[in-house]
Structures are given as structure tokens and as C-alpha cells.
Image (tube, rainbow, N blue to C red):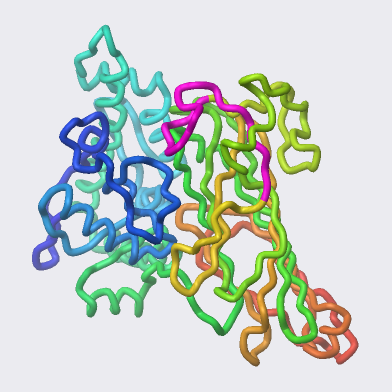
Amino acid sequence: MSINHGRIAPFALKDIGPIEENNPTSRVRGNHPPAPFNWWPIANWGLRDSNISADFPTSARLAIQTYKSEFDTTIDGVILFSPLLISRVIQTLGPITIPLYNETITAQNLEERLHYYQLDNQGILKEVIIEKIKQTPANPQIAGNQARKLFTKRLSNALMDRIRHASPYEMIALAREMLRDLKTKDLQIYISNPQLQQLLGKYGSTSEIDRSLKHDGLYIVQANLSTSKASQYIQTNIQDTVTLDASGGATHLLKLGLIYTQIGPVYGFDTYRDYVRIYVPPNSKLLWSNGFDAGYNHAFCGTYGYPACPQYNIYGNGALMCPPNMAQAGFATWLLNDPYYSELHPMNRIGPPTNLESDEPERAMFGGWVIIPKNCNMTVTLSWYVPPMGKNHYSLLIQRQPGTQPLVDLTILPTSQGCSTLRTAGLHVQGIMGTEDSSFTPPPAATNYSCTMLSHA
């Protein structure tokens, strides 16, 4: 997208898939991300993978460097946005009609129709027919790959045309919405000009990872790195119980619930492979954990001569709960050192995070694969200790991953000794985290001997 003196030149979305995939001249073949991201599990790395960092400015700089490498062109900035932003724009401007498809897109049906045309075979076939994509009998999938994003392209063109013809009142409403979405990180902008980037931080947000050493912090980042578009069917629940000791140190007990309810078709494999990274203050100490995939050398059940997986309670500890006969890892995209590529995978044992080498400065990280078969529920459990952080009252900042709306259940409660020493009451908060990052500070205790729980919904 080109902007000159405040005017946006006409542009169109371009599918990067044919450029980086199945292309013998692709420049991404054999590429690897920079050293902090040594955990990257795929043999290739390119522009579409560059949003790898939990810190958006870092990802944006990687995208600029990668674009230069792949297309020999220098760009000045990066813009990312979630479907939530587009739905709010349509809510402001009104429905968008796509006559060729006989579709009217509203804020309410936007995501569902995009998924239909990008992920549902019936929708993709409709695109092939409407757009007159030539089908090859020997490999009909080629036509589908060419067509599956053409409806999205037409919708983006129609939306941009609607914005260009918006009234002054509508433009003011859109500007207010953009400022709001900057704060919620549903709109992320990075500009290589330092002065403009500083201005973004002043009036919106730069989407940086919090690195403060003055308060406790928690940032959970999920990355679907499998050939599966099942993310739309995953509900993330975050339950964190924080116990404060007399010195002000915090012991966390985190239960990360990933609820997989497949109520529609999935483009790709059914099994959901999620690379989860949990960022905490740098001096945090992991006490124990369970729920991360232990790796190919720790097969547990399923195929290749291993016993059949147990029914319902797969590991016997409640970590993975499945309907009958659903605990199947199935097929997976090609990953480095995968001995089962192109074959059915067994279910591996689970355990602590396999990656404790942080890819973000001034943050500790607990990371690894979490494998969830179709319609199963996984609970990843971790406990860690954060030493006292300064002389201020305890405070916890939970950062929200852009585009997600997790259910958060947070409890902060001092021990009996901490109650009288810290003079801090308890705090309980529960609700959907769908807007900005949130900071939580327990209120002062009413008396030296009262640590009554304060609850918010």
C-alpha cells in the first residue's frame, strides 16, 4: 500500500502462497528465522512467517527485512489488523454487497463468510466456478488453492471503495474506531520513522511486549503452526491463582485450557498443533508443569505398535479429555526431524515445557508444543515463582494476544503471614479479555487482620 501526502493509492490484496509455496524459485527455501527463534520447527521461513515475535515492533522489523530479501523492495512500515477491526468498520459504514457472489456482508456474518470461502470446500468450489478458474483433472486442488482467497480480494476492494466514498461524519467515526483498535491491538502499525512511531505510542499503542521490572507480568502467545485452520474452533481459558508470601513474592498456578469444539469443516488436518509461549518476568523460577508434548521419542499410544489410547481421560490425570476413539494425532505438516511425516502420528507423552530459552529480551519464557486431537480438551498446568518486584504493592499486568478473546479467571490472595505483613486484601476477577491489556492490583486490607476477597466479574 502506497501513501503519498495523506492519500492512499489504489491497491489490491495479493496471495503470497503461490510465491512462497510450491515454487522452485522461491527465496524462502531453506531459510531460518534469526537466532532468538531457534525453536522454529519448519525448514522454510519467509514473509508470511515473519509475525513470529510476541513483540510487534520486532515482528514488523523482521517483515521489512524479509520483504526486502524476497522482493528487492524497501518498505517504510507494516500494518496488521484482525477480523474484529473489519467487522467494526462494517458496523460503522453499513453492509457491503458483493453482487457477483450474491452476498451481503455484515459485521455479524463477516468472519463466517470469510471462513466459508477460504476454508470450506463448497465455498472454494463456488469461487472456482464464479471466477472461472481452470481446473486440472489430474490435480483439482491447484484450482482450489488459486481460488480460495478471491472472494476476500473482492470484499477488500469493495470495502476500500466504500471507505473512499464515506461521508465526513463516517470518517470521523472510523478515525475514533481506529484509535480504539490501536489500544486493543486489533490494529497494529509500525513505522520505521522514529518520530511517527513515537506518535503512535502517544495516541494509541505500539503493541510492544511489556518488559517492566516494577510489576509482575503474564503474556500467553499461541501459534498455530500446523496445516490446520482449526483455530476458529479453539476456546482459550486462562485460570491463574497467585499466592503472595510475606515478602511480596508471587507463586503462580496457571491452568491454560484449550477447548476444541469442531462445529464445522476444517481446511487441512483435524489435529490442532499449537506452539505455546508463556512470558513472565526474567527472574521467575519454574516450579513444575505438565501438558506440553514431550517429543517424538516419547510415543504413548495410537499407531505403530503402541497400545490403543485410553478412552476419555487419555493420560489418566485429566490433562487431555476426549470423546471415545478421538485421541488420534493423525497426520501433520512437515516439521523438522519428524520421523512420522506423511504417516499417522502416535500420541506422545506430555510433561514440562521443552523450551526455556526465551526469544524476548528481559522476559523468561516457558514454551513448547501442545497437541489437541479433534473435539478434545487440553489443560496445560504450570507453577512458577516470581520474587518481590520493588517496594510497591503487588500488581499483575496480563497482556492480550491480538485477535484473541480468552476467558480469564484470576485470583490473587496473600498467605496468612502475607496478609498481616503486606496488608493486602484478596482479588478475584473473571470475564472475557477482549479489549486492552489489563493490570490487576489487590486493594489494601480493611484491617491488619482482614484479607477479604474482592470479586469482579
Can I make out residue 456 in this image?
no
Which SS type dominates the magenta stretch?
A: loop
Residue 18 lies, with reference to residue 378, above or below; the image says: above
Residue 93: % across, % down = 33, 51
Identity of the residue drawn at 64% across and 79% down: 395
The residue shown at (40%, 56%) is: 37
Q: Residue pushed farthest top?
A: 137
Q: Quadrant of residue 152?
A: top left
Task: Name, please, the residue furthest toward the front.
Answer: 297
State which region is magenta: 331-351
Relative horizontal placement of residue 83, taking residue 448 as reference (left or right): left
Which of these two is toward me, 163 or 1?
Answer: 1
295 lies left or right of 171: right
Q: Position of residue 7 (x, y in %)?
A: 12, 61
Q: Is residue 182 left or right of residue 167?
A: right
Question: Residue 237, percent across and down?
Answer: 65, 52
Q: Is residue 286 visible?
A: yes
Q: Quadrant of residue 216?
A: bottom right
Q: Which residue is at 44% across, 67% downward?
A: 360
